[in-house]
Amino acid sequence: MTETAENYDATKYERPSVTVDVVIFGLRSGRLHVLMVQRKHWPYADHWAIPGGFVNMDESLEMAARRELEEETGVHDVYMEQLYTFGEPGRDPRTRVISVAYFALIRTEEQALQVSDESNAVRWFPVDELPKDLAFDHEKILRFAIDRLRSKLEYTTLAFQLLPKEFSLPKLKRIYEEILGEQLDKANFYRKLRDSDLLEDTGKLLNSRGRPARLYRFRDSRIEGDFVFRYREAKKKDEG
Amino acid sequence: MTETAENYDATKYERPSVTVDVVIFGLRSGRLHVLMVQRKHWPYADHWAIPGGFVNMDESLEMAARRELEEETGVHDVYMEQLYTFGEPGRDPRTRVISVAYFALIRTEEQALQVSDESNAVRWFPVDELPKDLAFDHEKILRFAIDRLRSKLEYTTLAFQLLPKEFSLPKLKRIYEEILGEQLDKANFYRKLRDSDLLEDTGKLLNSRGRPARLYRFRDSRIEGDFVFRYREAKKKDEG
DNA sequence: TCCTAATAGTGTTATTATGACACAAAGTAT
DNA sequence: ATACTTTGTGTCATAATAACACTATTAGGA
C-alpha cells in the first residue's frame, strides 16, 4: 500500500529544509534593478545570491519573506507576491532545500534604503547586467521573476508599485518601456491611462528641462490587489 | 546578527514537512470535475481531501506530484503545473506542513481511469458541488486552482488538455462555457479559433442528432507550453 | 526679447477586433 | 416530405488599436 498523509508519523521521515528567497526589484535612475547579496561561506562563497533565509517553525511563508526583505532593506509595507517554489534535489549541496521564492517591488526612489551601494555584501544590479555565476539556481529564479514581472505588467498595475506616490505620465511610460524592453507610443499610452480612470491629477507640476509634467497619483481604491490595467501594443504579425 | 543561509548547520533547526497536493481536473459528461480522496484517519478522518503526499528526499517536487497523480489515477504524461505553495503554521494539526500544490488536467473521456466512481475512498466531484468540510485548507487550495484554471483559460490553450485528441468545435465551446460559467457566441468563438490557426481539420465527421460536427485536432507545434490563445468576450461595463 | 531645443501632451485616421444576431447547411426522426 | 436539431457562416455597427502629425509650455541662450 501507498504511503499517504493518513498514516504518517511526523518523526518518521527525513525532512527537507525550507527557505524563502526574495527577488527585490527597484528602480534606480529609471532602470530596473534587483538587490543581491554576496555570500561569505561555502557553498558558493563570494558568489552573488538572492536574499533569503530559513523559515521559522512558527511563521508563515509570507512572514518569513517579509522578514528577510526588511532585514535586507529596512522597508516594510511593500508589494510582495509568491513567485514559485524551487525544489530540485541537489540545488543546494548541503542538504535537500526547498525554496519558496517571492518577489517584491519597492519604491526605491522614495524610501531611503539602509543598504549601501558601496558595501561589498549587498548591491543593486541592473537586471540586464547581472553578475556571473550566481549561487545555487538563483539565475533561474531571477529569470523566472523577471519574466513574471514583465508579463504581469501587461495586465496589472504592478508597475505603479515601483514609482513614488506622485509621478508623471512620461515617467510611468519609461518604466513600462524599461521593463518590457520596447518603445511605446506616447499618445496611445496616455489615452489608455486616461480611459482607465486609474489616475488622479494632483494639480502639481514637475519642472524639468522642457514643458513641465503633470503629477498624478493612483486612485486608492484601485491600487490594491491586481486590478486589471491591460497595456499591450500588438506586435506586427510576421507569419507565413 | 541575523541568521542566514551562510552560517547554517543543517542539523541545527527543526524542519517542516513538505507535501505535494495535486488538484486533478477532468471532464465528465461535459462538466468540470475534480478528483478527491476520503481520509481514513486523524486528522480530518472521513473528510474529503485533495490527493497528495510527502515529498521523498531524492525526488523533485514535480516528480512527487506526478507520482501522486499516477497513484490515484494511473495516468501519466498529462498536463501539470505548479499552482502555489501553502504554508500557514497550523494548517495541519500534527506538525508544520508546507504543501506545494499542483494542478493537473486529464483527458477523462479518453483514458480509462483506474479510479472507480463507486469506491468510497476516491471520487470525482463537480467543481460546483464540492463536499462540505474539506480537510485542512483544501477548500482554499481548490478555489485557488479553479480560479487559476478559469483565468488561464482566457490566454492559454489549457482547455485543450481536457479534451480527447480529436474533438469538435461545439464541444470545445461547451468546455469554455462550463469553466468560465457564461455563454459564448458561437460565431465569434469559431471565428477566433479559425483565425488563430491552432486547429487542423481531421476530415472526419462526428454523427449525433443534428448536422454532424467536424472533428479537429491541435497543430502539434502549438499545443505544448502556454501558447497564447486569448478568448474573452468583454463583459458589459457596469460602472458608475 | 525672441528664438530654439526639449519635453509634455492632444487630434486624427485607417485598420483591426469585437459583440450581436440573422441565416444557411446537413444530418435524424416521423 | 417535413419538422426538428445541431453545426456552421455572413454581416454589420461599434469599439479598440497603431501610427503619426500636430500643438503646448517650459528653460536657456543669442
Image (tube, coloured by chain):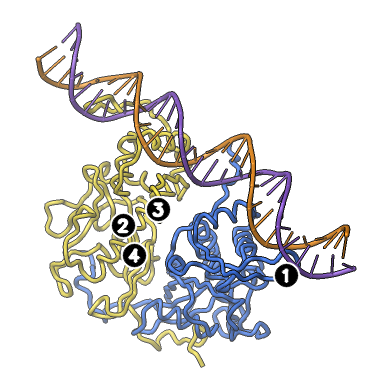
Chain colours: A yellow, B blue, C purple, D orange
Q: Secondary structure at mark 4?
A: strand
Q: CA distance from mark 3 to mark 2?
A: 10 Å
Residue at 43% x, 44% y is A223
Q: List the residue tagged with mark 4.
A: A101
Q: Nearer the viewer, mark 4 or mark 1?
A: 1
Q: CA distance from mark 4 to mark 3?
A: 16 Å
Q: Dot 2: within a 10 Å radius of its alpha carbon, few (fewer than 14), some, or many (20 or more) residues?
A: many
Label ID, residue A146 = 2
Q: Nearer the viewer, mark 1 or mark 3?
A: 1
Q: CA distance from mark 2 to mark 4?
A: 13 Å
The three-letter code of the residue at mark 2 reads Ile
The three-letter code of the residue at mark 4 reads Ala
The three-letter code of the residue at mark 1 reads Ser
Q: CA distance from mark 1 to mark 3?
A: 43 Å
Does the CB distance between marks 2 and 4 fall below 8 Å?
A: no
Label ID, residue A152 = 3
Query: Do the dots labelled 4 and 1 sit on one chain?
Result: no
Q: Dot 3: within a 10 Å radius of its alpha carbon, few (fewer than 14), some, or many (20 or more) residues?
A: some
- In-front residue for pair B222/B202: B202
Q: CA distance from mark 2 to mark 1?
A: 49 Å
Q: List the residue tagged with mark 1.
A: B208
| Position of residue A95 measured from the top left corner of the image (x, y, whole percent) | 27, 80
Q: Is residue B46 above or below residue A118?
A: below
